[in-house]
Image: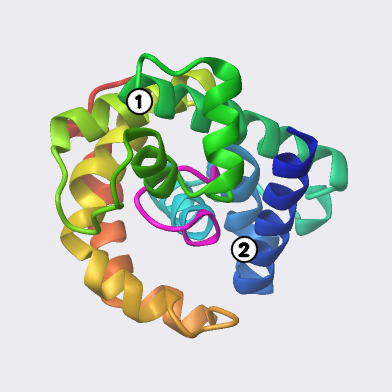
Amino acid sequence: MQQLHSESEEDDDEAIRRLPAADLRTTLARGVLVGGHCYGPRCPVDNIVLNSIWYAAAFPLRADDRIDVAVITANSLSRVVQRSLDGLVASLRHRCPALSHVDALRHLQSARADLRAAVASALGSRPSPTESDSEAEAAAFQAAAEVAQHPKPASLAHFLASVLPAVVTDAASILTGNSSLSQLTLCASPPCWRLRRYRMICRSLLPES
């Protein structure tokens, strides 16, 4: 468990390095600390980046609020990592109910916290990048978010299972090969057009947690 926790802390550090400092000083620090969990349909680092951006966009701060990047400390990140890992275990066991907690941790450690790979390992199959049951995916992601104490578990589950797959190609083109996401990329890229649109409708259309 300690090794998995350490690797997940490294994933958080990498995700933060890829986010633009200007946005971390305004909106994304809160996105990272509150919504930047590592479970989702992509690799852990990508999931942290996407979940942080989504939470900041879908549930923005008031104009007079400000959370500075300085609040992202080792202790605050460690808490986020632990909640994320609890969520990973919950999601994996939701999909594979026969797994014990210890076995779930073993599969997650072998998969380096990649949920899709851990599920495939537990089921004895290869991870599929395209085949999924959105209803089952949403239920598993909601189980993760609830255990991980995400403030909007139903909304996050809907985003991960139904919204993100619709823009996964665009998201991949931005996330793959970019060591750092520029502010322009975050503002102008197609996935974030969708995220901004999602922010406008999320409160009226998504179930409240």
Residue 42 inside the magenta-drawn segment:
yes
Residues drawn in magenta:
36-46
x then y, percent, for residue 94: 35, 20
Question: In the structure shown, which secondary structural element does the residue marked by tag 2 occupy?
Answer: helix
Identify the mark at residue 38; answer none if there is no mark: none
Mark before the other along the chain sequence, 2 or 1: 2
| Residue at (60% x, 69% y) in the render | 19
**Can you say whether 29 is above or below 183 in the image?**
above
- Image-quadrant location for residue 204: top left
131 on left or right of 152: left
87 on left or right of 205: right
| Residue at (46% x, 58% y) in the render | 43
Please state which of residues 25 and 3 is positioned toward the viewer in this rendering: 3
Please state which of residues 70 and 178 is positioned toward the viewer in this rendering: 178
Residue at the disc numbered 2: 15
x then y, percent, for residue 162: 18, 44
- Image-quadrant location for residue 76: top right
Three-letter amino acid code at the position of disc 1: Gln
Residue at the disc numbered 1: 142
Alpha carbon separation for disc pair 2 and 1: 22 Å
Residue 103 inside the magenta-drawn segment:
no
Asked whether the beta carbons under mark 2 and mark 1 sit within 8 Å of each other, the answer is no
- Looking at the rendered image, the quarter that the C terminus falls into is top left
Three-letter amino acid code at the position of disc 2: Ala
Chief SS of the magenta region: loop
Question: In the structure shown, which secondary structural element does the residue marked by tag 1 occupy?
Answer: helix
| Residue at (41% x, 52% y) in the render | 54
x then y, percent, for residue 151: 49, 26
**Can you say whether 169 is above or below 158 in the image?**
below
x then y, percent, for residue 40: 40, 46
Q: Badge 1, how many Cα within 10 Å: few under 14, some, many 20+? A: many
